[in-house]
Amino acid sequence: MKVLVLCVLAAALAANGAGILFPSERSYKILILHPYWARSHKNMMMAFAEALADRGHKIVYPFLHEVTFITVATNGMDQRQSAIFGNVLNPSYAPNVLTTYPFPMSLWHRFKNMIMHLYLPLYWNYWAVVPMIQKELSAHFPDLPPLLDIERNQSLSLINTHFSIDTPIPLLPSQVEVGAIHCRPAKPLPQDLDSWIEGADSTSTGVIYLSLGSVTPGNSIPAQYRQAFLEAFRRLPQRVLWKYEGELEGASDNIRISKWLPQQDVLGHRNVKVFISHGGLLSLQESIFHATPLLVLPIFSDQPRNAMFVNNSGVGRVLMWQEVTADKIVDALNDIITNSKYKENVVSMSASLKDQLTTPQERAIFWTEYVIRHKGAPQLRCPGAQLSWVEFLLLDVVGFLLLFLMVVMLLLYRLLKLVYATFIGRPSKIKSA
């Protein structure tokens, strides 16, 4: 009987495209605050925003069609981008993968007095950015509560992780994993690009795809590293598809450049053998989703940590920029392409990532609507968030234990002093002759 029920459930899920969401009871107005400027981060949240819009909700989110736009200025990013390779050019540079963690920043939804708060990783000073964001948003929403109050009263955190592609950790009911929420099946490529990649079967042994993400343009790569790549690609039989902004002098005939490429559609093509990446989290998730082995060259932020994951899990290899030479690039790429273990490992991990009862989009939508339906869902909130810093750090308990220890030591001292005076310190009586 149990087997029959499971079979019926599986058939129902398959017939409904694995969807288990009932129609939304009504349309809600949801505001998404996303003050980070990187296009890749917008792509991740775009998947969430569009899924909510498809449910009939009215979404306020920057750069999404058919919504109200709010832009939060982020000064100084152009200078930061131009100096992005400043550290890796330093011979003594060694990225600290143990302390490179994101500050929590808010992506929040608001409907009347019902608040849901989600975490989004950002790599600047949170406390310096909040007043700027608060001031700009207050012009559009005068009755908006302070952001720090929202931080304290959050009901839900949607976390861009999944145990199959990260370290398994215990989570609260209010912490929901939606890792790879932006990943999707590959779509057909533009005809000219598809013909070029398809042609790699007859003229070479596949395609190598190189992209350093949306923050690091190809033309910002220092000259010595750029020349090393050009020399390596000249010696390889594969075709190379390189996301590169500007002119690329000295490129061999097997290289094709473009300032923008549909990355997931490229990674999903059967002829793409290796993805040379900076190791950004979203690129890593896309590569695993589409089962493409990686060669990672981390630059900053979480990328060194992600590179360690790639190396330790056997889905690719890692090169540090200081050791980049044409020989090492050729050796690494040949190893990844010819050694079947990398492809087998990433195929296995991809299958685990996709094997879920519900999709990340469905989980995100369900819990978003759950918080709204239950008027902020205070039952999800961790009581620890309401503790004072004295209570959170257990300073009252530590103080009591220290006081207790001091009293015990004082009593022990007096006891030992009494014992010494009674049995050891008393002068002995010597009988006179």
Image (cartoon, grey):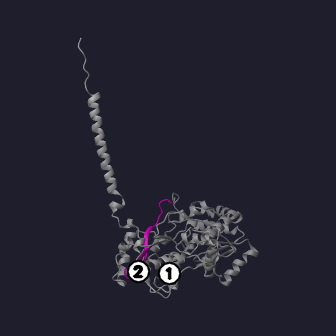
Number of other residues with Cα within 10 Å of mark 1, as a class: few under 14, some 14 to 19, many 20 or more: many
Any mark on residue 49, and which? 1
Who is closer to the viewer here, 185 or 359?
359
Magenta highlight on residue 341: no
Which element carries disc 2, helix, strand or loop? strand
Q: Which residues lie in the magenta part?
A: 97-118
Q: Which residue is mark 2?
A: 110
Three-letter amino acid code of the residue under disc 1: Ala
Can I make out residue 45 in this image? no
Tell us which disc is closer to us: 2 or 1. 2
Q: Is residue 98 above or below residue 153?
A: above
Horizontal and vertical percent for residue 234? 69, 69
Residue with the most extreme bottom position: 66
Q: Is residue 58 above or below residue 428?
A: below
Residue 200 appears left or right of 264: right
Total marks shown come to 2
Can I make out residue 218 in this image? yes
Number of other residues with Cα within 10 Å of mark 2, as a class: few under 14, some 14 to 19, many 20 or more: some
Three-letter amino acid code of the residue under disc 2: Arg
Residue with the most extreme front position: 1
Point out the image quarter for the C terminus: top left
Res 200 → quadrant: bottom right
Who is closer to the viewer here, 80 or 282?
282
Magenta highlight on residue 103: yes
Which element carries disc 1, helix, strand or loop? helix
Horizontal and vertical percent for residue 62? 46, 82
Horizontal and vertical percent for residue 307? 57, 63
Residue with the most extreme left position: 432
Horizontal and vertical percent for residue 319? 60, 62
Residue 200 appears left or right of 398: right
